[in-house]
Image: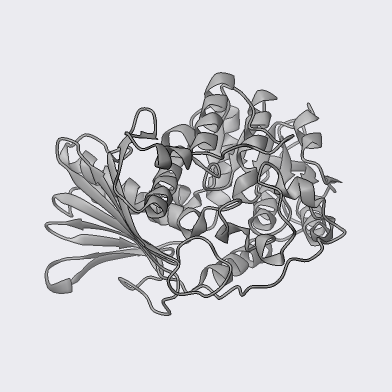
Amino acid sequence: MDRRKFLQNSAAGITATIALDEVAKASASERIRVGMIGAAGRASALNKYFAANQNAEIVSIAEIDSARLGNTVETVTKLQGKQPQVFQDFRHLIDDNSIDAIVVGTPDHWHAIPTILACQAGKDVYVEKPDGHNIVEGQRMVAALKKHKRIVQMGSQHRSTERLKSALEYIRSGALGCCLVAKAWESTRQGNIGNPPDSTPPKTVDYDMWLGSAPKRPFNRNRFHGRWRWFHDYGTGDLGNDGVHRLDMAFAALNAACEAQGDEAVSLPTKISATGGKWYFDDMQEWPDTLQVTYEYTSKTPKILTYEMRIWAPYHYHGESEGAVIYGDKAHMTIGNSRWRVYGNRGKLIKEVKGGSDAAAHVANFLDCIKTRNKPVCDLESVGHPASVLCHAGNIAARVGRTLVLDPKTETFVNDNEANQLRGRKEWRKPWELPEV
């Protein structure tokens, strides 16, 4: 199933499986008051998940394009029995002292600033992946959550699924043997977005605010809703879009194997190399459509994590359109979006476990941690940011075209000024400068 169909089916499933008049909400005093930034795309699904959770109440929704508010407001109102306020400017939500948590379902270039401002305002945050548009933004987000002692969950919902939890438990049993290599991949076919001319932004949009900290450019429908992710100014390509999920699954599997083997846990790699580029699509996309990244871990027992992207391929790899695999000397495990399978000698299927990928459990974990103050399963500092750095570093290695040496402590590249310049923006356009922490 391709990404678009998966998201559509997931969103539809949320509404279909919940009887709208039977959502048993906790008492008003016990519910966590939530402000949603974004109403369409991934944010549309997040609105449904939060509205359907008995422990949450969506108080307000901020959406830069008023034309995209209607259906989401209607659905949220039906699910929770109360209509949320609506705004175009998300700062109304930050300033509202009655709101406990902010959910950031925006394009990548709008992840960091709302998250930092929310932390500074004493609010907890659920932010979509990757954590920021670049490494510097992610570091600043982590600094904000630490300084203000906030709960910040990144939206890698696979971490909360029974599917991934059971896979990691199996790996920890040692059944795969000695594991030194893990791999993640994307082979879901994407489309050609063409080369439309610049035009006038919709009247329903504050386009200058939509650009935010990114450079001022003429409006183009390709650099806007849904397609912003393919441009350097706003997105992180498919490596940061879908790849972050698969890399995080492979990374989690590799660490589970380290635990089984008595090895030290892997964190950030010390070497990153990448090859690839925009080789297939003749259109406006800027990020690679073909890519291979290798991450090397020079721990006591060296490990390799690789990532492959072929977003023009109409066929599966290891039986999955996108996923992760970890190789042991006894067996290997493939983890997809709806199952995991273990194969032994001569390709014999040893075990298969099926399970879903929806975010209901991930949202529930976040809300529970707001009350308990425990770290969520995709805590930004220890899980979400490292996974995001893998994506950013892989993209940077591809752009400079050489192997990079990473200092895991500072998240800077050793003796490589060009690569370090790509760790952040040359400038964050005023007035949307990255907040100091």
How many numbered marks, from 0 up? 0
List x then y, in percent, for residue 17.
Answer: 64, 63
Residue nearest the observer in this picture, 233 or 180: 233
> Which image quadrant: the C terminus?
top right
| Residue 68, picture quadrant | bottom right
What residue sits 83% from the left and 60% below the top? 67
Up-down relation of residue 237 to residue 113 (above or below): below
Say whether residue 377 is visible.
Answer: no
In this rendered view, identify the residue nearer to me: 167 or 150.
Answer: 150
Q: Residue furthest top?
A: 147
Identify the coloring: one colour
Which residue is rendered at x = 56% and y = 61% of the image? 230
Residue at the outermost bottom position? 314
Q: Is residue 29 left or right of residue 195?
A: right
Is residue 390 or residue 398 the one in the foreground?
398
Q: Position of residue 107 (x, y in %)?
A: 63, 51
Residue located 59% across and 48% down the image: 108
The answer to whether 278 is drawn above or below residue 306 in the figure is below
In percent of the image, x 26 and y 60: which residue is there?
Answer: 333
The answer to whether residue 303 of the structure is visible from this angle is yes
Front-lying residue, 59 or 203: 203
Choose top left, top right, bottom left or bottom right for residue 335.
bottom left
